[in-house]
Amino acid sequence: MSAITTAHAIDPEHNKAQVKRIWKAFWILLVLTILELALGLTIYNIELNANYNEHLVLALKGTICILTLAKAFYIISIFMHLGDEVRNLIMSLAVPALSFIWFIFAFIYDGNSFKNLRNTDAGSHPSIENVQQHPAATPAIKEGEKN
């Protein structure tokens, strides 16, 4: 049995295929990274302008997020060898990973909500800006009296 394992490890064709696969992964990840950096620099240059289009910047940021997720799943597929596994195993690992992304958005939303509620004291009593300053109580001046 050990002879079969040793023979498989020394097989030059198998090694060439693995090296080719690693180089292919390197080039794909390099291109995706360069695209992300180019989009980031584009956002930086757009935001230097005083009246920039916020929707364009938001679309570019969304594109960067999508490219980052593509890189993450590609890395998982190649270097963690999930691309060679059966579909059920891949889905049992991918679905929790996607729910983790949902958790991030939920925590950001909840944190923002907490920040806003904390800043306004949740309406339990008026905030400082809403309190009207009452003039100091002065004795009522009756008609006909002078100081």
Image (tube, rainbow, N blue to C red):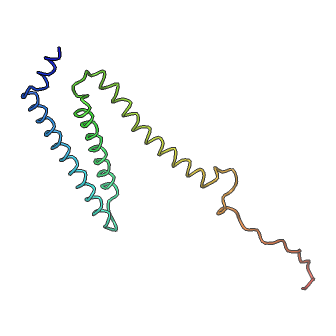
Which residue is pictured at 35% across the width and 57% down the height?
54
Q: Is residue 59 above or below residue 140?
A: above
Which residue is pictured at 32% across the width and 55% down the height?
57
Residue 16 at x, y = what percent? 8, 32
Residue 46 at x, y = what percent? 29, 62
In this view, the residue in front, 3 or 138, is 3
Residue 109 at x, y = what percent? 48, 45
Q: Quadrant of the N terminus?
A: top left
Q: Give the residue furthest to the top.
A: 1
Q: Is residue 110 above or below residue 2?
A: below
Which residue is pictured at 91% across the width and 77% down the height?
142
Which residue is pictured at 15% across the width and 44% down the height?
27
In this view, the residue in front, 121 or 75, is 75
Q: Is residue 14 above or below residue 70?
A: above
Q: Give the residue furthest to the left.
A: 13
In this view, the residue in front, 37 or 76, is 76
Q: Quadrant of residue 38?
A: bottom left
Q: Give the residue furthest to the bottom.
A: 147
Q: Quadrant of residue 131?
A: bottom right
The image shows a total of numbered marks equal to 0
Q: Quadrant of the C terminus?
A: bottom right
In this view, the residue in front, 70 or 120, is 70
Q: Is residue 59 above or below residue 42?
A: above
Residue 8 at x, y = what percent? 12, 22
